[in-house]
Amino acid sequence: MRRCSICEKLQIVTGCRDDYERLARYHYRDSKLRSYTAMFALKSPRSGGSGWQTVGVIVYKMPTPGAEFRNIATGGLFTGFDRATQLVLLNKNVRCINRVIIEPRFRSLGLASRLVRETMPRVNIPIIEAMAVMGLVNPFLEKAGMKAFTPKIQQRCVRLVEALSMVGIESKELIDPQKVQAKLDRLPAQSAEFIEFEIYRFLQSYSSHRYSRAGLERTRYILGKLTERPLYYIWFNPKLKLRTS
């Protein structure tokens, strides 16, 4: 993480729904928060010493029963049981990271990774997992110490990501449709013609959008398809053993 005076003053504390609600609008998914098991907030001192402001939040929830990569990552620890027993074991041993949100002014400082890395041990559970739709372009969970299990990337997605890079749009920028669209709009004629052909080729696999007009909505759709299959991440607490009873 890049060291700066702001980062040194930040504190991670137990959070609440108010902390989440302050930042919910900055998350790309439905902002409605349902049940959760733990929440931590990243706090920054306000200027003038007038208290603290919430600049980041992480939410943990109970695990879902079916996770294809969990069985691979754990060597089948939770397989071979009847459903009721499996659920009991999962609930005792696994928690899932449900949301990680950083207020936009504090992004690009490594704070998402810090929030994950420093709170996972505080959950006091043997296994922490996460599913990240944008994991391919923003690997903050890996930087926090989690291990990634990567789904196979379709060749058409690889080709378009490479084509975008050739015209100056890097993979780390693919989380921001507006920024990508702004760059597309400023491309010189030859580059614009090249990338338009690559986009047309990519969209042939999506019949309802084959002939979509260029613009922000088309860009949103394309970026969603480039990163639509979530990566699975897992972290084993080295200080805790699996709970079987």
Image: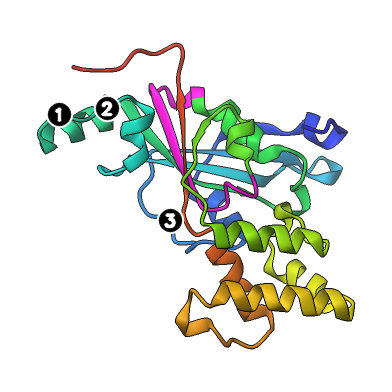
What is the C-alpha distance between the residues marked 1 and 2? 8 Å
Residue occupied by mark 1: 80
Residue at x 73%, y 63% (from the top left corner):
163
- Left or right of 86, for residue 202: right
Q: Secondary structure at mark 2?
A: loop
In the depicted structure, whether residue 80 falls above or below residue 66: above
Q: Quadrant of residue 81?
A: top left
The question of residue 187 being in magenta is answered with no
Q: Amino acid under label 2?
A: Gly
What residue sits right under mark 2 in the picture?
A: 76
Q: x, y percentage for residue 124?
A: 42, 22
- Cβ atoms under marks 1 and 2 closer than 8 Å: yes
127 magenta-colored = yes
Measuring from the top left, give residue 214's x and y in whole percent: 68, 84
In the rendered view of the protein, which quadrant contains the C terminus?
top left
Residue at image point 82% right, 70% down: 183
Residue on which the image places disc 3: 33
* Circle 2 Cα neighbour tier, 10 Å, few/some/many (<14 / 14–19 / ≥20): few
**Circle 3 crowding by C-alpha within 10 Å: few under 14, some 14–19, many from 20:** few
